[in-house]
Image (cartoon, coloured by chain):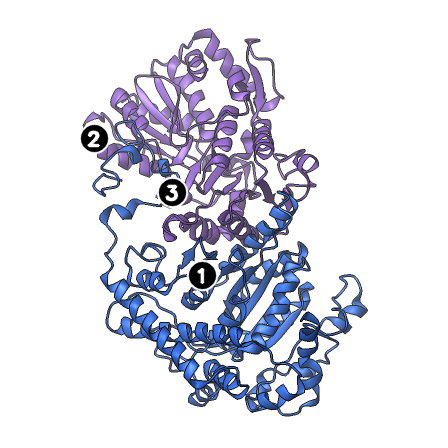
């Protein structure tokens, strides 16, 4: 089924562009009718909610813990309905004590429960980062395999709209650097469902980076994805759109931007291959390299800060493994190297936009003059 | 038996009439605040603050026990009690545990200076009464969470001395196969959940283990699950945010946990008095609705009595307790600490209250054991520790392939290799020769 969805997009032409149009519309409207009556549509929010629901009913050891997850139905309504269904012992509303409840989750995971700890945004995970890294990620190693930590830390990551510097940082690069953690970043509803289920079933600590602006977006979803045992493998990227001229890697919201940029580029005769990383750690280096060996050009897109970012790691790994295949320098597109400003126009400049991706692709294909590095 | 025990533990009425406080006790003057209800096992019911009544708050928040610190008083205070506090077997068990802790730590110091041990090593000399007093009351399924000063907690919980010594030498036969080290003692078999280098880090983890015990009883319907968790930490930790966060949540959800503060008055070179606005740590419990108890941590019998009550409270589902043990470490913070800031007279004062000599004196004077029997135990422990060192010495270092093992429980977390298959499926992966 995955292959069929991929094929639909890759074939280009009328079907793909109408799919894109529908995607654009669903940013504003609620789930709209898809062009094909065979596939359903589901928002990312519903996908996450259904994944949590199914995993909680399948395994009584799974419980959700975080601020506002219970009576408030979730700060972003991801845990809606779970309190009524499973009760307050399994959907635990906590006081505002990230370090405390992240540590409590880790302690419970040491003992065989499977907590899903929600951070209202990943910015607040910095208050608990000691527990994520030191007592979760490193424990299996320090105890030589005696104590594994089957915990999931999830929440929205990255910039939302106009929330200012302290609520907008992307943590993919920081968590992606730590051994012992698995870091996932879903894009579509299918990603959200499959990866969250895989994360909850995984015996290791998983950092699950969602995106607030994607919660309301609808994506077509096949019957296979709706099955309660649907799981996506951790560590495998997905080629969202096949192409032959330039590879664009992205994760989370940037995949949507990359796909739109690919549409624009297609009109100008550049066929872009878009890779949805899905998994930041472990990074699917083999898919990325195979794609670069095919297209010979690479653009990495991410929302986070440029220095030591995910793009830097991808660039290094491609240079190490596929140097001879590169026909142009690797282009890194990242957020501006500044704390996120508040003003709407400045915020737009601080986050990558579709035009940036298009320009970079053209530069990589020698269609335009290289720009000096901007902030 | 329990009725008799209830009568025995009456530290409050006894001490409120005594005026004999040792000079250093000016530090702790709990009797400035009038004791309202006594803890742990008074004949009156334990009165806890109702959260919404300010009047009650003023009256019954101080729940504590004051310990008699003057050593010489012990024999006479015993005549006040009709029965002894321990049986012979219990006494010998405690003695053996404390001697094991002391000999082991002394041997660690020797080995460190000979270069067999390295890195950060924090020794527990002087604090053995707290470990023996608390941990010897636990079942195997109960958990212990500790700090970097964790060798003796692991030993008291039942981790074999040879496993701990090998771990310190960094050998593959250690309890964590040499991957943890002095500060990270983990044992799933004995439910020792670490071993944490960051102070305060173990407290939320311990609270989580207690949460699991409650969850298993209430959600997973394992009706007889009454496992208790002990969290050990020091005076410096009591100024850390995570401590307060966990006191709050443990009290809120009535978790079966005992917070044991090993107040040895020093956090490396920072005196507790210089770092804390209110140095009486037991007082911080009642602020969250938890009984706060202060006990003489150099006296294993007193610690054991308080521990019994606190652990039973937790097992009955009545919630957490905060126990402050006034204790002292005879050595520096770690083996790298020159220990220059502590006053010689303070050290001498506490050296005179060595818990092992105190217990020995108690047992001999009350005819629980003879000197000869205790000597036999000491000799036996010497042999155990020697054997542990030999075992550790002769154990092999970890193999090269062990570097990449156990990072993940599911090693597919290492991702996919260039050939498109999972890295961990590459046979060269565990040999340590595959590129990661």
Subunit of mark 3?
Answer: B
Q: CA distance from mark 3 to mark 2?
A: 31 Å
Q: B369 above or below A104? A: below
Rendered blue, the chain in question is B
Quadrant containing the C terminus of chain B is: top left
Q: Nearer the viewer, mark 3 or mark 2?
A: 3
- Pointer 2 residue: A323
Q: Which residue is mark 3?
A: B408
Q: Residue furthest top?
A: A14
Measuring from the top left, give residue B118's x and y in whole percent: 28, 66
> Mark 3 near mark 1, Cβ–Cβ under 8 Å?
no
User: Depth-wise, is mark 3 or mark 1 nearer the camera?
Assistant: 3
Q: CA distance from mark 1 to mark 2?
A: 43 Å
User: What x and y, as percent, mark residue B210?
Assistant: 58, 54
Find disc 1 in the rendering and name its residue.
B198
Residue A187 placement (x, y as % from top left): 48, 28
């Amino acid at each position: 089924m995955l292959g069929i969805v991929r094929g639909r997009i890759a074939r280009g032409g009328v079907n793909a562009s109408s799919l894109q149009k529908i995607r654009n519309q669903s940013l504003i409207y609620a789930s709209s009718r898809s062009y094909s009556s065979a596939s359903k549509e589901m928002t990312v929010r519903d996908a996450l909610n259904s994944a949590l629901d199914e995993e909680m009913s399948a395994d009584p050891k799974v419980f959700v813990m975080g601020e506002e997850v219970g009576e408030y139905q979730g700060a972003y309504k991801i845990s809606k309905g779970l309190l009524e269904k499973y009760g307050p012992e399994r959907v635990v509303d906590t006081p505002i004590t990230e370090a405390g409840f992240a540590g409590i989750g880790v302690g419970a995971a040491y003992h065989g429960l499977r907590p899903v700890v929600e951070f209202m945004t990943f910015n607040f995970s910095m208050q608990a980062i000691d527990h994520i890294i030191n007592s979760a990620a490193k424990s299996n190693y320090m105890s030589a395999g005696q104590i594994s930590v089957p915990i999931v830390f999830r929440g929205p990551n990255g910039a939302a709209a106009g929330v200012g510097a302290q609520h907008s940082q992307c943590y993919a690069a920081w968590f992606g650097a730590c051994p012992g953690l698995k870091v996932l970043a879903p894009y579509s509803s299918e990603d959200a469902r499959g990866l969250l289920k895989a994360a909850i079933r995984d015996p290791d600590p998983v950092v699950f980076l969602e995106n607030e602006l994607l919660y309301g977006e609808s994506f077509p979803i096949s019957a296979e994805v709706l099955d309660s045992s649907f799981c996506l493998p951790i560590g495998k990227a997905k080629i969202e759109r096949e192409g032959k001229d330039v590879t664009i890697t992205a994760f989370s919201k940037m995949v949507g931007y990359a796909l739109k940029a690919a549409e624009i580029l297609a009109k100008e005769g550049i066929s872009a291959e878009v890779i949805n990383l899905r998994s930041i750690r472990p990074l699917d280096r083999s898919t990325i390299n195979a794609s670069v060996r095919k297209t010979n050009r690479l653009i990495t897109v991410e929302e986070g800060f440029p220095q030591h970012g995910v793009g830097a790691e991808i660039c290094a790994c491609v240079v190490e493994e596929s140097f001879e295949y590169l026909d142009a320098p690797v282009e890194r597109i990242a957020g501006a190297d500044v704390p996120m400003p508040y003003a709407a126009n400045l915020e737009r400049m601080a986050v990558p936009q579709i035009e940036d991706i298009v320009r970079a692709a053209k530069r990589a294909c020698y269609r335009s003059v290289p720009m000096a590095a901007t902030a | 038996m329990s009725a008799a025990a209830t009568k025995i533990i009456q530290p409050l009425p006894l001490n409120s009439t005594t005026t004999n406080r040792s000079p250093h006790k000016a530090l702790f003057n709990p009797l400035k605040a009038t004791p309202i209800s006594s803890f742990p096992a008074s004949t009156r019911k334990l009165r806890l603050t109702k959260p919404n009544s300010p009047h009650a708050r003023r009256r019954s928040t101080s729940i504590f026990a004051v310990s008699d610190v003057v050593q010489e008083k012990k024999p006479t205070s015993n005549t006040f009690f009709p029965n002894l506090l321990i049986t012979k077997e219990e006494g010998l068990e405690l003695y053996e545990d404390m001697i094991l802790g002391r000999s082991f730590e002394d041997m660690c110091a020797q080995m460190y200076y000979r270069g067999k041990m390295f890195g950060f090593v924090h020794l527990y000399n002087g604090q053995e009464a707290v470990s023996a007093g608390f941990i010897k009351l636990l079942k195997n399924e109960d958990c212990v969470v500790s700090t970097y000063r964790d060798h003796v907690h692991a030993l008291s919980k039942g981790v074999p001395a040879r496993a701990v010594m090998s771990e310190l030498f960094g050998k593959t036969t250690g309890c964590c196969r040499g991957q943890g080290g002095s500060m990270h003692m983990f044992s799933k078999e004995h439910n020792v959940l670490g071993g944490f280098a960051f102070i305060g880090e173990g407290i939320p983890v311990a609270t989580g283990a207690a949460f699991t015990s409650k969850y298993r009883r209430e959600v997973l319907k394992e009706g007889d699950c009454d496992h208790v968790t002990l969290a050990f930490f020091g005076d410096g930790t009591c100024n850390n945010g995570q401590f307060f966060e966990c006191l709050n949540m443990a009290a809120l959800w009535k978790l079966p946990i005992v917070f044991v503060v090993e107040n040895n008055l020093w956090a490396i070179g920072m005196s507790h008095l210089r770092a804390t606005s209110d140095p009486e740590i037991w007082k911080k419990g009642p602020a969250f609705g938890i009984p706060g108890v202060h006990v003489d941590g150099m006296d294993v019998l007193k610690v054991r009595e308080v521990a019994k009550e606190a652990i039973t409270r937790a097992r009955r589902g009545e919630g957490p307790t905060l126990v402050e043990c006034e204790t002292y470490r005879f050595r520096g913070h770690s083996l790298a600490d020159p220990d220059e800031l502590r006053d010689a007279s303070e050290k001498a004062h506490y050296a005179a209250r060595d818990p092992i000599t105190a217990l020995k004196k108690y047992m001999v004077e009350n005819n629980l054991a003879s000197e000869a029997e205790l000597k036999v135990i000491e000799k036996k422990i010497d042999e155990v520790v020697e054997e542990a060192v030999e075992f550790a010495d002769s154990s092999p270092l970890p193999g090269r392939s062990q570097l990449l093992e156990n990072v993940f429980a599911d090693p597919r977390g290492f991702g996919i290799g260039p050939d498109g298959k999972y890295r961990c499926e590459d046979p060269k992966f565990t040999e340590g020769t595959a590129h990661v």
